[in-house]
Amino acid sequence: MRQIIFIFYLVIKTPGKISNKLRWLYVLLKVEIFKINKLTIGNLSLEANNFNSFRVLYKEVFIEEEYKFKSYTVNPIIFDCGANVGFSTIYFKEKYPTSEILSFEPSPNSFKILENNITNNNILNVKLINTALTNYEGEIDFYVNEQFDLVSGTISERSQGETFKCKANKLSNYIERYEKIHLIKMDIEGAEMDVIKDLQLQNQLIKVEQFIIEFHHNTGDVKLDLAEFLAIFRNSGFDYSLKTKYQTLGQFQDILIHFYQKSIN
């Protein structure tokens, strides 16, 4: 009974429309009480690695709409870097049904579920790419966190767990095939600096209208310098908005940064 009361409390606290609150209530009651990782919500059939991941992903993507953006075309080209199991890819397709999407995900477990989610929801014009993104081509160590797969990645300090080799590639190799990218969403668990520096080196940042990037701050990795990261975009003609929170000075933070070319604002 206490759990149900707490679920209602969480839903009431959640900002947004009544329809969103009702969907969130339905998801929480199903996922938290029955500990399930598969659920049909409206016309969507969704699956995650476990019930904890399902709850977190659904809230971030569909309730809080962290990846909401305004496209100036009805058929934007979108790169979903760190697609995980595909909730963000499906969200983009709901907003822009005629979009073209490239979804990158290195984890074999998440990639299999990503394929299932795209197939089961009859999502079209999406290319799924099973590779890690970094600043070179070849192979890279990938660390799978079994307890919380959402922090699995190529940075050992961030993603401690079982290690395996996976394919690595440069995002610039994919961008060079396009004249313009309308959005790059990036959540690649600490590899964002390497990828963005390579795009800068290849003079490809200017091809992208908007980025939504989860930057991992205060990880202990000296390469992840927030001031340097912001300066790269500033010097390339971008402005930005940030979303974050913290409780203790100096603690690790996930900072959501929405970069946009000043010319489109």
Image (cartoon, rainbow, N blue to C red):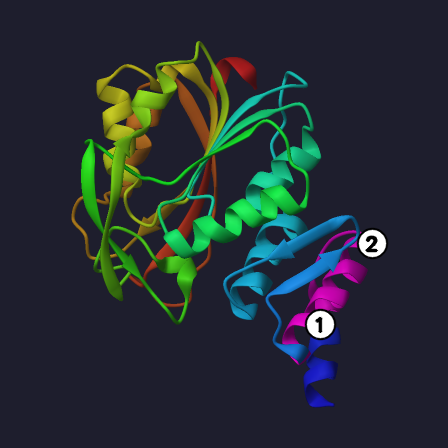
Amino acid under disc 2: Ser
The circle on residue 30 is 1
Q: Position of residue 43 (x, y in %)?
A: 78, 48
- Residue 18 lies in the magenta-colored region: yes
- Which residue in the structure is indicated by mark 2? 19
Q: State whether residue 129 appears in this view.
A: yes
For residue 235, which quarter of the picture? top left
Q: Is residue 12 left or right of residue 64?
A: right
Tell which of 133 and 119 is nearer to you: 119
Q: Amino acid at mark 1?
A: Lys
Look at 66% across and 50% down and name the residue there.
62
Could you say whether the residue bearing mark 1 is in a helix, strand or loop?
A: helix
- In the image as oriented, which residue stretches furthest toward the left? 222
Task: Give the residues in magenta.
Answer: 10-33
Looking at the rendered image, the quarter that the C terminus falls into is top right
Left or right of residue 206: residue 70: right
Residue 236: give x, y in percent of width and height: 33, 18
- 50 within the magenta span: no
How many numbered discs?
2
